[in-house]
Image (cartoon, rainbow, N blue to C red):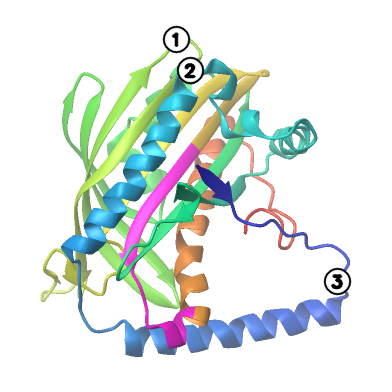
């Protein structure tokens, strides 16, 4: 039903090669910024065929999730890994690493084509020693505090309403990586208790508006679905499991953005795809730091996600 992206290792490079790689990366990022500004600066329209294909992708992905949630042996992604790889993951997680991987849902073994759109599908896991499920839920459901805990990715946060375990939340999202994008976003979030040690939640964006001239008198929102197209939909699926002397937290992230012209895709798409990976890593590091008081170690070069 789904597959992971390839993994890479960053060992064995001499300082000269590392410096050359960093220089090339800066040059490529600068070029990506120019291309994004010229090719994606104009408005893009979210079309029905794009949204329909994205919803099919989500539907098939959630069907896979439903199967996992009904089986206690596959509650966490790492439980489905071959034993050797699972042990490696557990060792890295025990050291405080955040593991991030790309995923891809397929239909009958075939890639799901999303016309004029790009699906971003990632999964991230962190382990927090000596943390209990109730502690984590208390922190994560304090939505008014998220602007402090997850800055600068979240600039403003506010709880709009609550009905038992269903929350409606406003977030101002910020991302600067060559190109700056700011959004006023609203989410419908529901938590589902499974037993005393496991819980999961689903969060669906209900409104995402790109903001022009933020913080200035002329600040305004661009029309919904008719903006630069960097973020049209954002769905997250979180699982919590208390075991091994602490708590695992897993976030699966599915987002929709515009596609770019094929001539530029080889350079621009990797940059666009890196944004959710970095967001997930920052989010879980901040959560772990707040709940444990421990700094999350940096991943080795090239190691935590690809």
Q: Is residue 269 magenta?
A: no
Structural crowding at the residue carrying mark 1, measured as other residues with C-alpha within 10 Å and reported as few (<14), some (14–19) or many (≥20): few
Residue 190 location in percent, x, y?
28, 28
Residue 285 location in percent, x, y?
56, 45
- Can you say whether 100 is above or below 220 in the image? above
The residue carrying mark 2 is 198
**Dots 3, 2 in contact, CB < 8 A:** no
Tag 1's secondary structure? loop
Question: In which image quadrant can residue 160 be found?
Answer: top left
Q: Which residues are magenta?
A: 251-265
CA gap between label 3 and label 1 equals 47 Å
- The quadrant the C terminus occupies is bottom right
The residue carrying mark 1 is 195
> In the figure, is residue 126 to the left or right of 205?
right
**Dots 3, 1 in contact, CB < 8 A:** no
Tag 3's secondary structure? loop
CA gap between label 1 and label 2 equals 6 Å
- Can you say whether 39 is above or below 206 in the image? below
Question: In which image quadrant can residue 77 be found?
Answer: top right
The residue carrying mark 3 is 13
> Residue drawn 45% across and 52% down?
121
Tag 2's secondary structure? strand
């Amino acid at each position: 039903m789904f597959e992971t992206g390839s993994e890479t290792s960053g060992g064995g490079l001499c300082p000269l090669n590392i410096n050359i790689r960093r220089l090339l990366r800066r040059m490529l990022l600068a070029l990506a910024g120019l291309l994004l500004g010229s090719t994606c600066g104009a408005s893009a329209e979210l079309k029905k065929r794009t949204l329909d294909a994205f919803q099919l992708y989500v539907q098939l992905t959630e069907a896979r999730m439903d199967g996992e949630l009904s089986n206690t042996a596959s509650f966490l992604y790492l439980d489905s890994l071959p034993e050797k790889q699972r042990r490696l993951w557990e060792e890295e997680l025990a050291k405080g690493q955040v593991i991030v991987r790309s995923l891809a849902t397929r239909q009958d073994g075939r890639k799901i084509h999303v016309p004029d759109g790009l699906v971003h599908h990632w999964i991230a896991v962190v382990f927090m020693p000596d943390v209990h499920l109730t502690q984590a839920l208390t922190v994560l459901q304090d939505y008014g505090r998220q602007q402090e805990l997850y800055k600068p990715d979240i600039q403003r946060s506010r709880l709009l309403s609550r009905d038992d375990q269903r929350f409606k939340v406003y977030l101002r999202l910020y991302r600067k990586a060559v190109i700056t994008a700011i959004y006023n976003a609203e989410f419908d979030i529901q938590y589902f208790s499974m037993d005393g040690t496991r819980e999961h939640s689903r969060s669906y964006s209900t409104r995402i508006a790109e903001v022009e001239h933020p913080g200035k008198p002329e600040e305004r929102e661009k029309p919904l679905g008719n903006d630069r197209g960097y973020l049209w939909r954002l769905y997250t699926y979180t699982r919590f499991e208390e075991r091994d002397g602490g708590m695992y937290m897993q976030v699966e992230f599915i987002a929709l953005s515009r596609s770019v012209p094929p001539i530029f895709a080889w350079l621009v798409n990797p940059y666009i795809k890196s944004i959710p990976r970095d967001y997930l890593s920052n989010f879980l590091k901040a959560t772990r730091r707040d709940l444990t008081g421990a700094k999350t170690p940096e991943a080795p070069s090239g190691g935590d996600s690809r």
